[in-house]
Amino acid sequence: MDLIEPSIHELADLYRRKAVSPVEVIQAYLDRIESLDPRINAYITVDAAGAMEQARAAEKRIAAGEGGPLTGVPLAVKDVLCTKGLATTCASNILKNFVPPYDAFIIARLREAGAVILGKTNMDEFAMGSSCEHSAYGPTRNPWNTDLIPGGSSGGSAAATAARLCAGALGTDTGGSIRQPAGHCGVVGLKPTYGRVSRYGLVAFASSLDQAGPITRNVRDAALLMNVIAGHDPADSTSAPEPVPDYTAVLDRDLRGLRVGLPAEYFAQGLDPEVEGAVRAAVDVLIRLGAEPVDVSLPHTEYGVAAYYIVAPAEASSNLARYDGVKYGMRLEGDRDLMDMYLETRSAGFGPEVIRRIMIGTYVLSAGYYDAYYRKATQVRGLIRQDFETAFERCDVLACPVSPIPPFKIGEMTDDPLAMYLTDVYTLCINMAGIPGLSVPCGRTASGLPIGLQLLGGMFQEARLLQTAHQYEQASEISFGREVPSL
Ligand code: GLN
């Protein structure tokens, strides 16, 4: 058997039966990363020694019959989540030498469950971007066609999962950064409800929108990771006390009677015909499985991009004020007075997209502009949230595209930030509303590239999204999760 072949739940099963050894599996992944990652650039840091040590510990636990749900499972983690003793750069020069003294809550959860952390994945700097090109470590490439972007900002996690450079990964999503790269790489990505997963140890971009979640080859694996990472954390006051269900329990339930809403505004002008065709075909599969289609409207969608690109940079400008070269992170060498030290350290440490966001954010929060921009945007946010509440009175889930276009060429949009922002049109509002969203592969373009279906649910409806996606995945002919890209 090719040891990189089994997905997370298959691997857990093989370990339970002692059919494969975690040491051999981890070694196979490390060898594959060494030979193929130079072509993808999915990893910023590979922790080969640490992973082998964890693998040996996993082997002992399995032999003693003491394994947890993820014992010996090789995972990758976006480089925005703090890992004790392992560099956490956020793909930024300003954090190049930052080694956290603690684990993020969800990293600690993964370790308790026995997971082996292979390394930290590439991303847009501080998670700002949609293409994984804004990284101080160079762009990540799409494993299905290395001339193309993998999506962003969790592009490294999605590309590594698709390319079999890990069995699954964690990403984060502020405006689409789990769902969009998952869609572009032919894997599954879930952005949980705001508050479902602790943000403790997740380096903040926009604190009212950020949420971490799984990126996996199939839906069952995403449910398994959710079982481990979801739940209340007293160290994150925004984390929800809501009980956590077993997300695998409902996967096999059929979809008869499920009301699937189709939001008109998410099938709008600018939607690529191949993407639209694949998403509509996926909805037909859901209908064949017993779901009932319902036409719904989310009328404030058209203000989503504008409002998000005020709220997110505003929060970012405040969150990123802490990188001043004083307590941690990089500081420019040489003698300067304090103000010059701040200015020059920040100018040298941050990349152009991050600087753009800090400037936009500072502007929209400044006296005289606050009411016109920031306050207005938060009002729009309220309307967007209400749109979803109204829609969910008439349906159980919403189905729509993830991205209006398939993966594009590296470099194609780097000179046009607005064009790049507009590609987030179908993902941003979900974060503004706080609801969960899932991306599952639903088709391929004529040139063989993955297309994602996005499923949305009401607050804390992750189980229903996973059930719907799993039923779809079983019935559909799209098999990216079982295919290995030739690299
Ligand atoms: N593309 C969006 C942005 O650039 C969302 C990023 C994210 O979800 N982290 O802000």
Image: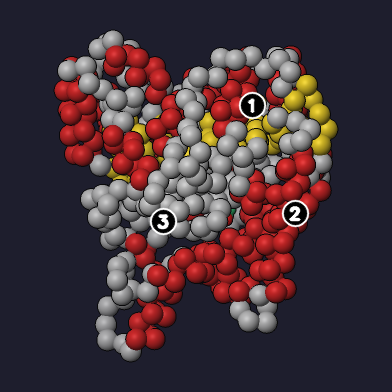
Residue 407 appearing in the image: no
Residue that label 1 marks: 442
Question: In this rendering, is residue 325 above or below 246?
Answer: below
Q: Residues within 10 Å of mark 2 (few under 14, many from 20)?
A: many
Residue that label 2 marks: 383
Horizontal side, residue 2 vs residue 199: left or right: left
Residue that label 3 marks: 203
The quadrant in which residue 487 appears is top left
Question: In this rendering, is residue 271 above or below 399?
Answer: below
Give whichever of discs 3 and 1 has the lower sequence position.
3
Query: Farthest bottom residue?
Result: 337
Distance between the alpha carbons at the discs numbered 2 and 1: 30 Å
Q: Amino acid at mark 2?
A: Leu
Of residue 237 and residue 402, the one placed in the foreground of this image is 237
Give the colouring mode of the picture.
secondary structure
Secondary structure, mark 1, is strand
Residues under numbered marks 2 and 1 in contact, where contact means CB atoms less than 8 Å apart: no
